[in-house]
Amino acid sequence: MNTHDLVAFVAVVETGSIVAASARLNLTQPGVTRRIQNLEEMLGAQLLDRLSKPLKPTAAGHEAYEQGRRLLRMLDDLKSGVANDGVVRGEFRLGLTPFLSEAGLTAPLDAVRAEFPALAVRVVSGWSPHQVERVCRNELDAAAICLPDGAVPPADLLADDLGAQPVLFVVARDIKMPRIVDMERLSQMSWVINQDGCGFRDALKRQFDAEHLPFNIAVEALDSELRLSLVARGLGVGLVTPIGLRRSAFRDKLRPVAVRDFKPAVRAWIVHRPPAGRLARPIELFRDGLDRELKALIGA
């Protein structure tokens, strides 16, 4: 097998197009196409559904991708193991959920890049359930995720628990509302909240469902500052982390509201598939750095 053909196929699956794969690999589009065709001919199977946009792997392609990604990681491990300088090279594909991005994209990522300058770190943002799926499919080497408190990652992944992460309810400062309310009072208001897939949103919805109360969503938005700006204008209740509120340009126009008998939280995890190989130390370094950041933010 020509590993260049496999690299091209993996790039097409991960980017969803020949054009994007050619840009990633610095090859011409016909060159990428030829490599895919070579691999299909060698394996005797069609690997891509060429009628889909973006390009998607066939059933055989899914299997080839998962096995191929594992093989490429093993080759990277082999190269690092036999290199005379002992330098860790290759690619480190790291998933981050939006809630952890602010903490993870600072000191923890800087530490990894400083200790492993020859390692190409590629960060992918996404909701936790999707990140877990991508780690399971070998599309990511590791991911920092948040799950509702009490939930755990899949048993076939190695997982490090980084502890419970708090969240605050906030409303516009000029809204007449007690500082402590119950869930029934909250159910009477509209919400400005993350899109579906957010662990905090899932925990909140389960609490409303458990008390047979409605959950009225006015606005769904991914960007935290956009959500806080809408809450500050009186569009509804929002969720924000303590550090997010402290750093927000709208903090003076918002005030936290406590909820009686309900303190929402999710747990942060670092997950990856075993064995980590050459990436064991980079994953450990990022995990430890993120753990310190999260503990500092909670205690601040």
Image (cartoon, rainbow, N blue to C red):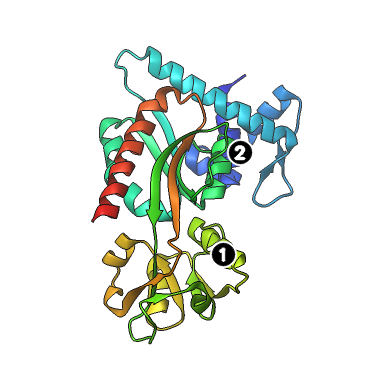
Q: Position of residue 269 (x, y in %)?
A: 44, 42
Q: Amino acid at mark 1?
A: Lys
Which numbered tag is attached to residue 30? 2
Q: Position of residue 86 (x, y in %)?
A: 32, 17
Identity of the residue drawn at 58% across and 61% down: 206
**Residue 81 got which mark?**
none
Outermost residue on the left side: it is 300
Q: Is residue 219 visible?
A: yes
Quadrant housing the C terminus: bottom left
152 relative to 284 in the view: left or right? right
Q: Count neighbours of disc 2 (C-alpha within 10 A) and say few if under 14, some if 14 to 19, many if 20 or more.
A: few
Asked if residue 261 lies left or right of residue 55, the reply is left
Q: Nearer the viewer, residue 61 or 168?
A: 168
Q: Amino acid at mark 2?
A: Pro
Considering only vertical position in the picture, is 288 above or below 254?
above
For the residue labelled by badge 1, is the local secondary structure a helix, a strand or a loop?
helix
Residue sitting nearer the eye, 154 or 279: 154
Q: Nearer the viewer, residue 187 or 51?
A: 187
Q: Which residue is mark 1?
A: 205
Image location of residue 192, percent across then percent down = 48, 73
Question: Where is residue 48 drawn, in percent x and y?
Answer: 70, 39
Q: Nearer the viewer, mark 1 or mark 2?
A: 1
Name the secondary structure under disc 2.
Answer: helix
Q: Report, in whole angstroms, how far the alpha carbon at label 1 lies from the one at label 2.
A: 49 Å
> Neighbour class for label 1 at 10 Å: few (<14), some, many (≥20)?
some
Q: Nearer the viewer, residue 75 or 149?
A: 149
Q: Residue at x 42, y 67 (%)?
A: 239
- Above or below, 201 against 60 in this view is below
Residue shown at 67% from the left, 44% from the top: 56
- The N terminus lies in quadrant: top right
The answer to whether residue 26 of the structure is visible from this angle is no
